[in-house]
Image: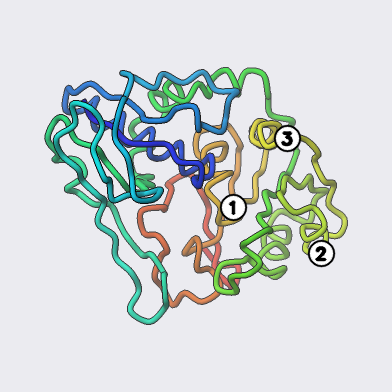
Amino acid sequence: MITTEIYNGQGPGDQMWVYLTTRYIAHEKGYDFGIGHPEKWKLKNLNIDFGLTVTGGSNTKEGGPPISLPDGIANYYKERHTYHANYADCNISDVDPNSFDIKDDTKLEGLFHYSFLLKENSELFKEWLDLNSVIDRNPIVPGKVIANIRGGEYKGVPSLILPKKYWDLCLDRLGNPPVEIVTDDPEYALTLIPDGKIFKGTMIDHFENLFTADKLILSNSAFGFFPAALGNASGIIAPKYWSRWNISDGFWAMEMDKCHRFTYIDREGKE
């Protein structure tokens, strides 16, 4: 069995990534899979198969390293990461190929934002994530534009938080249409798009509502990634270089995040 663990500190998008990649690796290698602590899964609206039951094991902290491995698990593999030499804690990692060459009975640890897998496996991943049911009950509203704005703790990281200029460039590109805003920080979001209409609801309501967009403007948060990448929006705009749109001179943070479905724009509004 290949396993990974769901943590409270992961956002819904990060939880989906570790789930998908772990299950995909097990699927490709013919191993069983099991996901530890499925009760910590945040999107309870999704009917997820968490595989075999995982018992035992403990960690020094969320994300490892483990004090002990789960029962029956003999190996531990932590995804290899690369950091920018000139910016503290700036993860620029691409796919770790060794993640796909692990032995059976291994616990995987990492981010695993392996967007390249989506191009050939979108239908399989929609099935695994129970997204077809979400798509069916949240049909696209023709002409609807949604901006998924992340505020909160992002505001304390100047190199990460997307400025008003980004949202202005995106809206200019779309002809400045009416916009619905899905956000964790309504007051802040309205400083960026003053005429926007705030969508109100729970986190799950926010997630499902993103599937109704005809055009979707993303922040650099994983929350909106799967509704954009696996939903049916006709156009998706995202920040080029992802989490370092503000400062990048050409590097991606992370390289592995690049998705073939998105139109990425830089600080000049160019693709």
Q: Nearer the viewer, mark 2 or mark 1?
A: 2
Residue at 26% from the left image edge and 32% from the top image edge: 70
Q: Along the horizontal axis of the image, is 145 left or right of 161?
A: right
Label 2 with label 1: CB-CB less than 8 Å: no
User: Callout 2: 10 Å neighbours few (<14), some, many (20+)?
Assistant: few
How far apart are the alpha carbons under marks 2 and 1? 20 Å
How far apart are the alpha carbons under marks 2 and 3? 22 Å
- Asked which secondary structure carries label 1, the reply is strand
Q: Name the one closer to the observer, 131 or 107.
A: 107
Mark toward the start of the polypeptide (2 vs 1): 2
Mark toward the start of the polypeptide (2 vs 3): 2
How far apart are the alpha carbons under marks 1 and 3? 24 Å
What's under tag 3, amino acid-wise?
Thr
Residue 212 spot, x, y in % from top left: 69, 32
Q: Quadrant of residue 7?
A: top left
Colouring used for the render: rainbow
User: Callout 3: 10 Å neighbours few (<14), some, many (20+)?
Assistant: few
Residue 228 spot, x, y in % from top left: 56, 40
Q: Mark 2 points at which residue?
A: 191
Q: Name the residue under label 1.
A: 237
Q: Is residue 44 above or below residue 90?
A: above
Mark toward the start of the polypeptide (1 vs 3): 3
Q: In which quarter of the image is residue 73?
A: top left
What's under tag 2, amino acid-wise?
Thr
Q: In which quarter of the image is residue 21?
A: top left
Q: Name the residue under label 3.
A: 202
